[in-house]
Image (cartoon, rainbow, N blue to C red):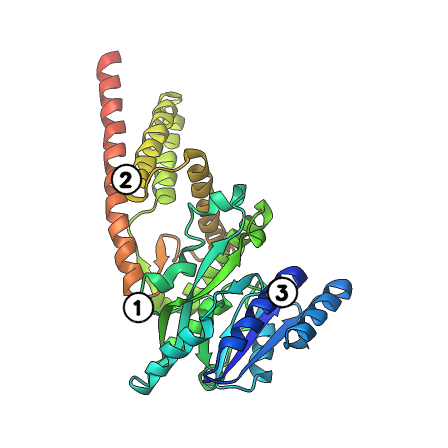
Amino acid sequence: MNFSIVIPTWNRSKLVDALLESLYEERQRYDEGETEVLIVDSSKDEEKASIVASCEKYDARYIDGVDSVRKKRNKGIDLSQYEYILFIDSDVTVKPGLLHHHAETLREGKENPKITASFGLTEFVGKKKFWGRVIEHTSFLDSFAFAKQMPFVSWAIGNNIALRRDELLKIGKFEENFPFKLGGDDLDMTYRYTKEGNLIKTTPEAVTYHSRETWNSRKAVNDRAKRWGTMEYHILKRYPELVHRRLPMTGDVVALVTAVCGLMALLKQSLVPLVFLGGWYVLLYGMMYGYHVATKGKTNPFFWTMGVIQQGKYRFWRLVMSLKKRDLSLAFKGQYFGIYHIRDDYRNGVRKTWLYYISIISMILAMAVYKLIIG
C-alpha cells in the first residue's frame, strides 16, 4: 500500500523540519509499500531556502506553490504518483506507526469497497499558554479528536487523513473559490467525498502531534473564529441537507432576553428591567458554569468565560455573513455532519434549555415579587 504524503506550508521552516524528520523515520519503518513526501510551499527568501534544505535532508520533494492552502493541496494531488494521498499539516509531527495504522484501515476496503479513506487522531502538544487554555473551552478543537469518538465521519479536517487519489480526482479535489485562502475547503471536500458513496473510517491509532505554537496568540484564535464562522455560512448554503433546526443556544437566549428587557426599560422609562437583566446575567452565568463543572469537571472560570466569548465570536461572524447576503435563514440553525454529532448536540441542548427556562422563570418570579412589594 503506497502513500503520497502532501504537506502545504508557508513560513514554517522550523516546524517543517521537525515534521520531515519524524516522517523520514516513519518512512524507514514502513515496509508495506512505497512512500513519497511532497512539500508545497509559498515561502520566500530565507524561509524558502531553509525548507528546501530540509527537503533535501529528509528525502522530500519541494514544490513551489501559490499563497492558498487549497491550491497547494490540489497541486500536491496532481503531482503525486501513488494510490493513496495522505494530507498532513505542516505544524505537526507523526507518532511511530502512523502509516501502518492507516494502511490497516484502508485494507478493510478489500472486504468493504466503500472504505476508501482513513482519518487519524490529532493531539496537541507543547507549552499551553494563555490562548491555549482559552480554546479548550470552545468547539474549535473538537474535530481533531473525532477519531476516538466516532467509528466513521461524514467529513474531516485536512490533517492526518488518507484518501484514494482516483476518488479525489472524481469529485474535483478541493474547492478553490471560497472567500478565504484557507478554511472550510477540507470540510467541503471530505463531505463531497462521502456523498459520492465513500466511507471515511476513523483510525485513532494513527496519531499526529499538533504544535500549540500556531494557536498561542490572540490573532490566531480570532482569525480562526472569523474564518470558520464565515465559512460555516457558505458550507450550509451549499449543502442545505446539513442544516438542522436546533434547540436555542446561549447566545440566542441572551440576545432575546436582553432585547425584551431593553424594550421594557424603554417603554417604562425605568432602569428596573435592566437591573433585573443584570441579575439574570449573573444567575445564568452561574448556572452555565455549574453545568460545565458537572459535565466536564472543575475548571478555571476565567478561561471558561474567555472560551464562551470566543465561541460567540464564531457565531457572530456567521451572522455577519448572513447579513451581508441579506439572508437570515441560517441564523438559528445548526451545522451537523453525521448522526453522532446530531445526537450529542441534541442531548446537550436539552439540558441547557432547561437551564434557560429555570433562569428566565426565576427572573419573572423576582419581578413579580418586586411588583407586589412596591405596589
Q: Residue at x 55, y 66 (%)?
A: 89
Q: Nearer the viewer, residue 83 or 309?
A: 83
**Which is nearer the N-term, disc 2 or disc 3?**
3
Compare residues 3 and 192 and report the one nearer the observer: 3
- Residue for point 46% across, 52% down: 319
Which residue is under mark 3?
16
Callout 2–callout 3 Cβ contact below 8 Å: no
Crowding at label 1, few (<14), some or many (≥20) Cα neighbours within 10 Å? some
Query: In this rendering, would 33 be left or right of 62?
Result: left
Q: Which residue is mark 2?
A: 294
Q: What is the secondary structure assignment of the residue under circle 1?
A: loop
Query: What amino acid type should be assigned to the residue bearing mark 2?
Result: Ala
In space, the residues marked 1 and 3 are separated at their CA atoms by 30 Å
- Picture disc at residue 45: none
Q: Residue at x 44, y 50 (%)?
A: 315
Going by the image, does 23 lie left or right of 256?
right
Give the amino acid type for the residue marked by disc 3 in the picture: Val
